[in-house]
Amino acid sequence: MPCAALLEAGALRLSEPSRALCRPDIPAGDVGAALAAAGEFASAAAALGRDSAVYLDTLRSLGAFDLTTARVIEPHLDALAILAEAGVAPGDVLPGGGDGAWGVFAARAPGLAARREGDGWVLDGVKPWCSLGEQLPHALVTAGTPEGQRLFAVDLTDARVRGAEEPWVSRGLVAIRSTSLTFDAMPATPVGEPGFYLGRDGFAWGGIGVAAVWVGGVDGLVTAVRAAAGRREPDQIALMHLGRLEVITYLLDAVLADAARAIDGGNACGAAGLALSSRVRAVVADAAEQALTICGHALGPGPLTSDETHARRVADLGVYVRQHHAERDLAAIGAATLERH
């Protein structure tokens, strides 16, 4: 089916051809289809650190297509990049070969601990904020150990992993249910040494990758406003909205390109990488909030109440960008600035 027909069918509506995917086999909002296709994007994860623009552009394209789809595939690419940074492959850390999509569950979890048992390790306790924890086959999970925080690979299909009956009332990312998982003496394979997850350079780069998805969400909003302006002669207010969005897009293009160059050039390692990630995420989060407001002013309530794709994109981006901690993250940037100077 040609892309034009897909647009009419609603599978890829409001997507900018130069930035959005054209994948008829991944209907927007279909978590199962996204999980099934996640492995096809593995080459993008391999580009991180060498040709990082490919990694960031892939995530941006996913976000421009559909933020629910991107929210499924981004953690999978992050997990593959983490394993590569540790010098292992998925098949090295799970007996079954680690085929299929991966998640990364790294929320703070005082109630989860890893302990040695025989020649291996097991996890005991509860891990919160496990997105799609009941649908993914594998995940990388952080847990406390006597030697400090460590990262472990786990098989989520094992009966010793149980999901929780917790409410998920979100109006954005509705299909990306996050819940707690309980591990009961669950066998786990360590990935890296204690402190590896937070101490590696890729931790900061992964945060920039999430911001690239947010940029894709903004691209979708910009496309919607441009399309609406093209359906009738725009007045000065409509032109102002388009101009503001064009400036935002230019800024985001420059920010991601600069981040990719810094990563590939060895200028985003250690503290410099964390500082870069913080700045990129702050710029993109602010731009996303501006774009949501501009789009609402430009389009009014119509598409929010009659266009499924647009309404989902607005709701999804509003929830997704809240991974940025707003004023708290800006205060941390300010504190770091004072330290440097």
Image: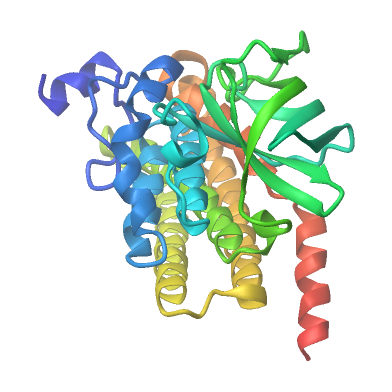
In the rendered image, residue 154, in percent from the top left (x then y), is placed at 60, 30
- Residue at x 36%, y 21% (from the top left corner): 36
Up-down: is 11 above or below 197?
above
Relative to 280, 141 lies left or right: right
- Residue at x 76%, y 63% (from the top left corner): 330
Viewer can see residue 216: yes
Out of 136 and 122, give the one closest to the viewer. 122
Name, please, the residue furthest toward the left.
2
Up-down: is 276 above or below 300?
below
Asked which quadrant contains residue 230, the reply is top left
Name, please, the residue furthest toward the front.
118
Out of 308 and 166, give the one closest to the viewer. 166
In the rendered image, residue 245, in percent from the top left (x then y), is placed at 44, 53
Relative to 24, 49 lies left or right: right
Out of 286 and 51, give the one closest to the viewer. 51
**Number of numbered discs:** 0
In the rendered image, residue 274, in percent from the top left (x then y), is placed at 65, 68
- Residue at x 53%, y 47% (from the top left corner): 291
- Residue at x 82%, y 57% (from the top left corner): 328
In the rendered image, residue 39, in percent from the top left (x then y), is placed at 34, 33
Q: Quadrant of the N terminus?
A: top left
Q: Quadrant of the C terminus?
A: bottom right
Viewer can see residue 318: no
**Colour mapping:** rainbow
